Amino acid sequence: MKALPARPGAQRRPILVPSAPSLHPDESAEGADVLLEHPGALGVPLWGALRDFMLWVHTPAGERTALFGPGAGDLRRAALLCLRDEPELWAPLLTLAQMTEAPGRADHGRLVHAVRSLARWAERRGAPGTRLAFTQAAALALPDQPAAALDAARQARDLARHAQAETWFRRAIRLSRGRDWESYAWGFIGLGVLYMRAGNYPAARAVVCRALRTARKRRLRGVTGSAHHHLFVFSSDAGRTHEAYQHARAALHAYGERHPRLPALAHDLGCFWAEQGWFSRALPVIQAAIPLLADTSERVMALANVARASAGAGDRETYESSRAEVMSVLDDPAFSAIASEALVVLAQGDSSLGEWARAEAAATRAVSSAGERGEGRIRMVAEAQLDAIRAARVIARSGRVQESDALALEAEALAEDLRASLTRRALQAAAAA
């Protein structure tokens, strides 16, 4: 832990900032993910550049002059000759190679930009471990910037590196307290998602409620919408339907029609209705949301839910096409963060149509994937689903969950509002194109 000094004139105790975590507790060497994802000639210069930069970051500025031996820059540049045809990769690696020639005079901003460029390259190449390694390196070089810590936290969370993610989230919270209230609130929301995936609902609810209080107090409308959105998910999972609708309506109001997370809210409401057996209500809402979802993983997850809802509604053609599209991408590491949940959802759809062999295969794979990634909540659901499949019965109720007249009216009004908002949004996007 280290202490950040208080601002001039401030009368408060120093804020203790958690030290940054190592890149991965299971690695035998820092940056080993880079070598695993890029074996051979490509991985060596990437790994070497990361190690050089980390050594530079961890060395006090006044002691960097003799950090590398004579001729280090020439050796690094010679190793890059094979990458001249890849300027997107070669240019940032060249910047890091030049750093070894005069480390005491190296420009901090240029080096961080180079490292972030390598992280973006890794994202486009579908190399999540490499992306995280360079993202964390950039965050370590920017020790006072909560946004950099949040970026590292989210990526670590999506790779199921829970201890790393929690440390980065708490670091971001400490760094932003009293300085950047938006990042402060996002840090608590990020922790809430992390705890929810691990199956710790009380902790998840507590930290997201804290984010909501901060967002309201600081009038952060977008963060307020996100907090209500997550609390809707928590409430629906806990069976508190009336409370869930209150949070959904509040999220819809806070987001407004132009917010990028509105389609995700529509998708999550559709999933909730499918869980309740209201497939005809769920299916058009999820389908309307898919073209507006910016994230590819979210679109794949939405397609899995279309498969499930269409199976429940007896629409086999839509079920078959949606299921096939989801299964075709789940082996891609880029979708590892949603694979376990998508498989559970597909297994539920399979069960609705009596496709027991498919259902058992999907649920078995979901149990294994969730166990490997430490996703306690998903693993519990997948195991229950698998037990039900093996007993040749559907885990979800075949009939609809009963609703009071008031709840039914509220649900239908929400569905109509969402469909109308998504339709207007799609028309605006088409007109702009």
Image (cartoon, grey):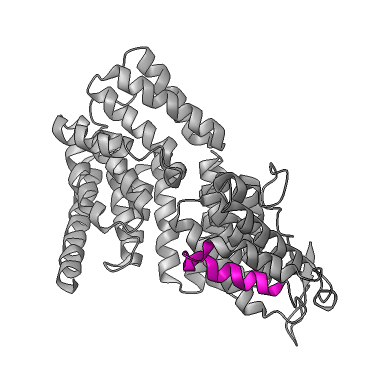
Front-most of residues 357 and 43: 43
Position in image of residue 96 (x %, y %): 64, 70
Q: How many marks?
A: 0
Q: In the picture provided, is 98 more to the left or to the right than 349?
A: right
| Residue 275 vertical position relative to residue 300 in the rendered view, above or below | above
Give the quadrant of the N terminus.
bottom right
- Residue range in magenta is 83-99
Which residue lies at the image location 39% right of the left edge and 62% below the top edge? 225
Which residue lies at the image location 41% right of the left edge and 42% below the top edge? 332
| Residue 405 vertical position relative to residue 252 in the rendered view, above or below | above
Position in image of residue 214 (x %, y %): 53, 67
Q: Quadrant of residue 261?
A: bottom left
Q: In the picture provided, is 14 more to the left or to the right than 48?
A: right
Specify the farthest residue to the top. Answer: 391
Residue 285 belongs to magenta span? no
Give the quadrant of the C terminus.
bottom left
Residue 95 belongs to magenta span? yes
